[in-house]
Amino acid sequence: MYLHGVQAMEIILLEGISAFVTFLAIAVFGFVYLVGSSIFGDMFDHGDMDHSTDGHGAGPSIFSSRIMSVFVTAFGSFGAIGIHLGYGTGASTAMGFGGGVLFGGIIYAFASFLYGQQASSHIRTSDLVGNTAQVSVAIPKGGMGQVRCTLGDTVVEKVARAAKGDEIPVNTLVKISSLVGEVAVVDRTE
């Protein structure tokens, strides 16, 4: 009778250790992957796969390797904690899943916040047409000069020529009437 009790205790102990070791191995794998992807870049994110596919094409995805590795690390850690506290495998798995969702969500929210703080300096050439600019390099008769135009917080410099071919001195205000390639065609403002 005593022998069966010891064997039963050993089986319970081995099941507990193996579940603990399994959760711990999952946590270690997630952590090692997180450190590796931080050092070497996203290892399994190809192209724009780590960005949102909601039609906006911007922002982090919940499936990016860093967010998923945080989820896996937290899952394993919380699962191991659950086993260590004496909870069963099912309860520990639920704890791990909850911890993974919580910490993965925190990282996702932080990454989304950082992404939202990025500014774009992309200016479409069509945005310049119709705007007022200042001649920064005089435009000689029939020749080329340069104009400076401010769009929001961005200053854009463009090679320019006069629409009528006349001379336009430095600091003269002009209106950009069109763009031909990279050259702004300008007219004096009245």
Image (tube, rainbow, N blue to C red):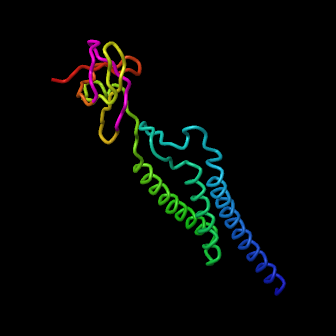
In the drawing, does residue 75 fall left or right of residue 2?
Answer: left
Q: Position of residue 185 (x, y in %)?
A: 31, 18
In the drawing, does residue 34 fall left or right of residue 140?
Answer: right
Q: Position of residue 137 (x, y in %)?
A: 34, 27
Whether residue 158 is situated above or below residue 89 in the rendered picture: above
Whether residue 99 is situated above or below residue 68 in the rendered picture: below
Residue that sits furthest to the right in the current view: 3
Q: Quadrant of residue 74?
A: bottom right
Q: Quadrant of the N terminus?
A: bottom right
Whether residue 65 is situated above or below residue 149 in the rendered picture: below
For the image, the number of numbered tags is 0
Q: Quadrant of the C terminus?
A: top left
Q: Quadrant of residue 120?
A: top left
Residue in the image at 24% along x and 19% along y: 187
Residue in the image at 62% along x and 68% along y: 77
Q: Nearer the viewer, residue 161 or 55?
A: 161
Residue that sits furthest to the left in the current view: 190
Residue 58 shown in magenta: no
Whether residue 154 is situated above or below residue 124 in the rendered picture: below
Residue in the image at 40% along x and 45% along y: 119
Q: Position of residue 18 (x, y in %)?
A: 74, 69
In the drawing, does residue 74 fall left or right of residue 132?
Answer: right
Q: Nearer the viewer, residue 111 or 181?
A: 181
Q: What residue range appears in magenta?
A: 155-170
